[in-house]
Image (cartoon, rainbow, N blue to C red):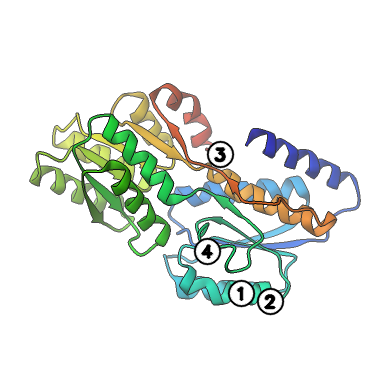
Amino acid sequence: MKKLLASVAIAAVVAMAGPALATDIIVVAHGQANDPFWSVVKNGVEKAAKDTGVKVQFRSPETFDMVQMGQMIDAAVNQDPDGLVVSIPDGDALGPAIKRAVAAGIPVISMNSGSDVAHKLGALLHVGQSEFDAGKIAGQKLAELGGKKAICVNQEVGNVSLDLRCAGFKEGFGKAVKVLPTTNDPAEVEAKVRAALESDPDLNVILALNASLVGEPSVKAAQAVGRNTVLISTFDLSAGFLKFIADGKAAFAIDQQQFLQGYLPVAFLALNAQYGLVPGGDVPSGPNLVTKEAAAKVIDLSAKGIR
């Protein structure tokens, strides 16, 4: 992946050495405005725009709203950009809008979610991770660490990507798993996880699907009820959760490198617009397990909005 990113950066420098790109790219993501995960994606988008010299607009609904997101994609198609980047948390809901973009001759790259439907909808490629496989890897690892009974804390039930994480986790863990639905309000997450721990003394594994909004409150809930031996892990990174890992209060985080998910599609579409170049396949940005040995090294980068 480092070699791939380096190649993109070199190509971008070459592109900037010639005439300025008159290229417009629109990014439509499902991420909510209060989610730090998506601010890192946006940082990647903005860095790619700066490196390649293209104009990029980043749009997302204020809440997890597939109707509004579909309307945003339609509005982007009406602007006839040189490229469109989309996340696809619900292929059924967003498919018609994405197909309209493809039919209009707009190159589309999907990122973050939708690896299972991206090509069917006409996307050139997908940048992200297999959510089911990532969940399965997490389940296997937590079972190896001594997990017996688990909850998968899902802050966006109905988001296909998050549902796949829990499904993969169940398969990999191979033992009792219950999905605990919440919102993305950290206070609610902490209260619900605390209640789950207090009501079930056999519960010893928690998988969160977001680091700052779910993972950190889950650790605080376990600490509040004195359940210090509960194995807690999360998808994605935050400086706070990485500190918990480094201090031995959490097991690991699953890093999908969302900065790359923002950066690479924009860089690829910029190169496609100028040279007709595009990778011949999907780019897996994860999963990568960040354990205690590595956590301290990436805390600073996470705080800076890169990891």
The secondary structure type at the circle numbered 2 is: helix
Pinpoint residue 100: horizontal percent, then vertical percent.
Answer: 63, 77
Say which residue label 2 marks.
103
Residue 110 seen by the camera: yes
Q: Are marks 2 and 1 in contact (CB under 8 Å)?
A: yes
The secondary structure type at the circle numbered 4 is: loop
Amino acid type of the residue that numbered disc 3 sits on in the rendered structure? Ile
Pinpoint residue 256: horizontal percent, then vertical percent.
Answer: 50, 43
Say which residue label 3 marks.
306
| Viewer-nearest residue: 224 or 203 | 203
The secondary structure type at the circle numbered 3 is: loop
Q: Is the residue marked by circle 4 packed among few (<14), some (14-19), or many (20+) residues within 10 Å?
A: some
Tag in front: 2 or 4 = 4
Identify the mark at residue 99; answer none if there is no mark. Answer: 1
Q: Are marks 4 and 1 in contact (CB under 8 Å)?
A: no
Image quadrant in which you'd find residue 291: top left
Image quadrant in which you'd find residue 84: bottom right
**Left or right of residue 188, residue 269 in this image:** right
